[in-house]
Image (cartoon, helix red, strand yellow):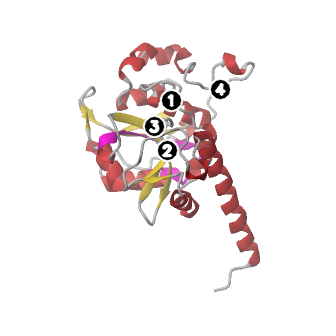
């Protein structure tokens, strides 16, 4: 069937826009041209780096990438090795345009940063920045910290759901604006170094059944495409601090809370 010229033009513009944004993300990471100038660690063969030609192509082909556009403009590097959760929350709160505290370094503008995230007294009642700096954040604490900013945060422990439920919920979330999904997983189960980690998902590629993780430890790993089953296995691990499995959190504005993608 012949493709209408107007449709061809739309596809051309869309493709170039995606490439422009994705290359901007890679430049921020020092990954343009496939050269990992930040000296990130090598990826295991089963993970596909977003800094590769294949990684770019997966985004071009994805039908579930709404969150990529917003998150790529808010992408930050965690400021210390315990702040992966804080960095991830800052990205989604800015993406949701939640009223933010003042940021002295950007005065007179207001924006969430990892430095001002704990200025909210309600947030400090959940955890202090000193505690987070020492031991990081559990999945339940992640949900509580997000809720302190009056967003709807729903926590899903992997032990209470299934791979199919996660895939369905996450893919649907990534097709919709103004909601996000943060994952809490064990790096070792994905063939990466060290322990538990938190980062946002940005896209889903249906044909290969892979999710794109915008890894906030940008000094360590690039964003990666990981198979859903592998990611699920990494989330379905025990967090010894919490005594529960890891999992994921969906985040949305309160008025969208009635639209549940997965029955609890």
Residue under pointer 4: 111
In the picture, measured across the screen, residue 23 lies left or right of residue 207, that is right
Secondary element type, mark 4: loop
50 w.r.t. 124: above or below: below
Span highlighted in magenta in the image: 173-188
Secondary element type, mark 1: loop
Residue under pointer 1: 78
Marks 2 and 1, the one that precedes in the sequence: 1
Image quadrant assignment for residue 199: top left
Residue in the image at 71% along x and 22% along y: 106
Marks 4 and 3, the one that precedes in the sequence: 4
Marks 1 and 3, the one that precedes in the sequence: 1
Q: Is residue 207 magenta?
A: no
Residue 244: image location, x then y, percent: 25, 33
Nearer to the camera, 78 or 154? 78
Instruction: Identify the disc placed on residue 222.
Output: 2
Characterize the local packing of mark 1: few (<14), some (14-19) or many (20 or more) Cα atoms within 10 angstroms. Answer: many
Marks 4 and 1, the one that precedes in the sequence: 1
Q: CA distance from mark 4 to mark 1?
A: 16 Å
Q: Nearer the viewer, mark 4 or mark 1?
A: 1
Residue 93: image location, x then y, percent: 57, 32
17 w.r.t. 252: above or below: below
In the picture, measured across the screen, residue 33 lies left or right of residue 258, that is right
Residue under pointer 3: 220
19 w.r.t. 27: above or below: below
Residue in the image at 55% along x and 60% along y: 53
Q: CA distance from mark 2 to mark 3?
A: 7 Å
Marks 4 and 2, the one that precedes in the sequence: 4
Nearer to the camera, 228 or 151? 228
Q: Nearer the viewer, mark 2 or mark 1?
A: 2
Q: CA distance from mark 4 to mark 3?
A: 25 Å
């Amino acid at each position: 069937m012949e493709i209408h010229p107007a449709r061809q033009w739309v596809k051309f513009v869309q493709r170039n826009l995606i490439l422009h944004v994705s290359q901007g993300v890679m430049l921020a990471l020092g990954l343009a041209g496939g050269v990992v100038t930040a000296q990130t660690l090598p990826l295991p063969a089963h993970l596909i780096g977003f800094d590769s030609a294949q990684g770019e192509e997966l985004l071009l082909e994805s039908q579930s990438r709404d969150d990529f556009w917003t998150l790529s403009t808010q992408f930050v590097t965690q400021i210390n090795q315990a702040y992966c959760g804080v960095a991830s929350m800052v990205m989604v709160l800015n993406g949701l345009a939640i009223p933010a505290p003042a940021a002295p370094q950007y005065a007179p503008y207001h924006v969430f940063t990892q430095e001002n995230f704990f200025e909210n007294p309600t947030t400090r009642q959940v955890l202090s920045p000193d505690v987070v700096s020492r031991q990081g954040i559990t999945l339940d604490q992640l949900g509580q910290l997000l809720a302190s900013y009056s967003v709807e945060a729903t926590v899903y422990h992997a032990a209470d759901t299934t791979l199919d439920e996660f895939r369905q919920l996450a893919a649907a979330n990534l097709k919709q604006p103004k909601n996000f999904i943060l994952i809490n997983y064990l790096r070792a189960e994905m063939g990466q170094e060290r322990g538990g980690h938190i980062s946002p998902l940005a896209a889903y590629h249906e044909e290969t059944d892979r999710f794109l993780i915008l890894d906030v430890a940008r000094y360590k790993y690039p964003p990666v495409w990981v198979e859903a089953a592998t990611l699920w296995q990494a989330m379905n691990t025990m967090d010894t601090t919490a005594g529960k499995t890891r999992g994921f959190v969906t985040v949305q504005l309160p008025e969208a809370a009635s639209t549940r993608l997965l029955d609890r």
